[in-house]
Amino acid sequence: MSLVAGIDAGTQSVKVVVYDAARREVVATVSSPLALISDDDGGREQHPADWVAAVRTCFDRIDPAARARIAALAVSGQQHGFVPVDADGNVLAPAKLWCDTSTTAECARIMDAVGGTARAIALAGNPVLAGYTASKLPWTKTHRPDAYARLATILLPHDYLNFVLTGQRFCEHGDASGTGWLDVRTRSWSADLLHATDPDRDLGACLPPIASPDALFDIAPAMAGQLGVPATVKVAVGGGDNMMAAVGTGCVEAGRLAMSLGTSGTLFAYSDTPVIDAEARWAAFCSSTGGWLPLICTMNCTVATEQVARLFGFEAREGDALVRATPPGAGGLVMLPFLNGERTPDLPLGKGVLAGLDTTNTTPAHVYRAAMEGATYSLKYGFDAFVHAGMRFERIVLTGGGGNSAAWRQMVADVFGLPVDVPAQAEGAAFGAALQALWALRRAGGDAASIAEIAREHVTADPALSVTPDPARTPAYAAAYRRFLQHLDAVTPLQRG
Ligand SMILES: Nc1ncnc2c1ncn2[C@@H]1O[C@H](COP(=O)(O)OP(=O)(O)O)[C@@H](O)[C@H]1O
Ligand SMILES: O=C(CO)[C@@H](O)[C@H](O)COP(=O)(O)O
């Protein structure tokens, strides 16, 4: 029987999951780390060649017998990255990533050119925020004029890996909606946003065609050889990592809410119709399954816990004991964890703040807890906007590396007041990509199963990891969250500059 594979190019690593759908069994999970190039101006970049090398390393680590049985695969990728490619397919510069805040001035210029936030929302559903792809183009024009001059195609990270795998330039709606150029209502490029980004050039000519969610492409024979997979392998369109995590957590039906605790923190819900906020309190993205995916993204999730763990000389995965040794609310210690600047709340030039220090709470354990709480409260701040807009959810499905922490799973349940489930199939984004490949393959074979039916069949919660809110702790978290919001209100005028 054949297998499907999902490749997830996240910020910190590339992961590959190989899935046996007939047996409902993950037969391989491998990963290879990625380095981040950081600059004092907020620049955060990676070399696309490193993603390709990491994909090769991952496949080298998979049993050749399993590789030989792969029939289809799909790629999930960190959203928003800008991969400038020339006419011959050469990458012209390092990719500026979703967490790059060096283009804040360019965002402001695009928003001025288009006529302000309300106008951008009317035209395309989203304003151009720091991190989205759009502002990276004018930055490149100024700082890398040679790359700008030779630019033929703008690819997102997962589009670039698809290009390497198939030799074809294409994108899909989910990840494309994170560029800032897609009108998410009509699911087509917005000529106004493109013109506001660069009045001197027809940017539309640099954007690849948008493929349908169930399209399949042939793998390039040379890549099949390099990865040790059959030359008959089909490549599905894949998507942004949150769009693929939506599939891998079963968030492909209305009413579902999923959360990812990775480098970024994200919270997203599936909808059959566009979910646009006039105040842009969430990102009105498309899903990669034909629908929409309103999404909250914080830029400092495991960034904060890892930074504190490193400061005190331990590994984040050892942190649960410290969280258990300290009370909800961290003894009054509050961390605004904006170490990389922040998108939710919208403080791209923001900095981290540690407040409420006293002689009892100035310990590594309290600071680590305050980091985990701060990362969780930032997501709650975004979630409150969903609730304020009338959205209601019954549970959260959790994925991402932070979900490995039992203390964090319980904290999410207590802070959000909702039961938390964790899929038995870890690596939600890679698993979701594998399921998308399965879905597209089945459709090509004449099976009309919907992606929701596929997810219902294959995504199962691990009962050992499910948690419910603890009524003894929720009041302390509610009080600590109010403190977090008070500190946020106090520093916002300073951090908006
Ligand atoms: N048990 C754990 N406790 C806390 N954090 C963890 C644990 N296991 C993994 N992580 C964190 O998860 C992060 C990686 O998550 P992942 O979802 O793979 O990120 P990304 O997709 O952004 O590369 C790392 O920062 C790591 O510190
Ligand atoms: O910018 C966003 C979403 O808008 C991020 O969620 C990126 O997609 C990066 O994801 P991870 O590497 O943290 O999974």
Image: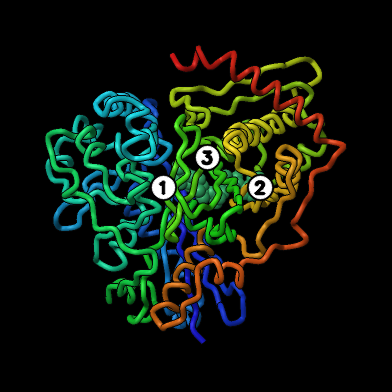
Q: Earlier in the sequence, mark 1 or mark 2?
A: 1
Tag 3 residue: 296
Q: Of the residues shown, which amino acid type is indicated by label 1?
A: Gln
Tag 2 residue: 393
Q: Of the residues shown, which amino acid type is indicated by label 3?
A: Ile
Image coords of residue 343 (percent x, y): 48, 32
| The quadrant where residue 379 appears | top right
| The quadrant where residue 490 appears | top right
Tag 1 residue: 79
Q: Is mark 1 within 8 Å of ligand 2?
A: yes
Q: What kind of colouring is applied to the model shown?
A: rainbow
Disc on res. 212: none
Residue 441 in the image: above or below residue 386: below
Residue name at image x 64 percent, y 52 percent? 398
Q: Residue furthest bottom?
A: 1
Q: Residues within 10 Å of mark 1 (few under 14, many from 20)?
A: many
Indicate which label's residue lies in the foreground, 1 or 3.
3
**412 left or right of 226?**
right
Residue in the foreground of this view, choosing between 475 and 306: 475
**311 left or right of 103?**
right
Indicate which label's residue lies in the foreground, 2 or 3.
2
| Residue 310 appearing in the image | no
Q: Is mark 2 within 8 Å of ligand 2?
A: no
Residue name at image x 56 percent, y 78 percent? 20
Residue name at image x 37 percent, y 81 percent? 230
Contact (Cβ within 8 Å) of mark 1 with mark 2? no
